[in-house]
Image (cartoon, rainbow, N blue to C red):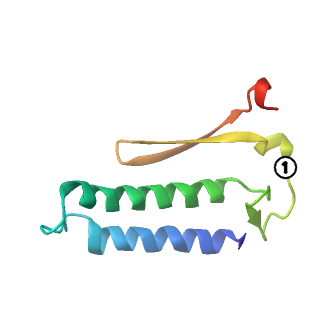
Amino acid sequence: MFREEKELENGIFLINKLINEKVKDCYDCKSSIYENLNIENLCILGKSILKSAIIRKESRGAHQRLDFPETDDINFKKITVVNYHNNKININFEDIPNFRK
């Protein structure tokens, strides 16, 4: 799969649209609370993946970007760490531990 920033941004836009129109405050009373929360969590996960792909401005392994075709070991030979806190997705990069290099 080849990606470009414009398409990744559009994916985030579409997920936000889905959340606002179909997920947020629109719980299905025929489904369990867990199913409803799972849909919201899947949307957050999808946005996390897309945001991580946007920030990683390189191509590596299965992550191939047409707008950044080269591998950048200096800035991105790291582990991507994502956390979700206070309704905000935070993305950081951490050095790869020596035992994994």
Q: How many marks?
A: 1
For the residue pair 74 and 95, the one nearer the viewer reads as: 95
The C terminus: image quadrant? top right
Q: Is residue 91 left or right of residue 93?
A: left
Name which residue type carries label 1.
Asp
Mark 1 Cα-neighbour bin, 10 Å: few <14, some 14–19, many ≥20: some
Location of residue 57 in the rendering, given as x and y in whole percent from the top left corner: 74, 56
Q: Is residue 81 left or right of residue 3?
A: left
Dividing the picture into quadrants, the one containing residue 26 is bottom left
* Residue drawn 18% across the image and 59% down it: 32
Location of residue 92 in the rendering, given as x and y in whole percent from the top left corner: 60, 40
The N terminus: image quadrant? bottom right
Residue at label 1?
A: 72
Location of residue 29 in the rendering, given as x and y in whole percent from the top left corner: 12, 67
Dividing the picture into quadrants, the one containing residue 17 is bottom left
* Residue drawn 54% across the image and 74% down it: 10
As displayed, is residue 46 above or below residue 79? below
* Residue drawn 52% across the image and 71% down it: 11
As displayed, is residue 89 above or below residue 67? above
Q: Residue furthest left?
A: 29
* Residue drawn 25% across the image and 61% down it: 36
For the residue pair 62 and 81, the one nearer the viewer reads as: 62
As displayed, is residue 32 above or below residue 100? below
| SS at badge 1 | loop
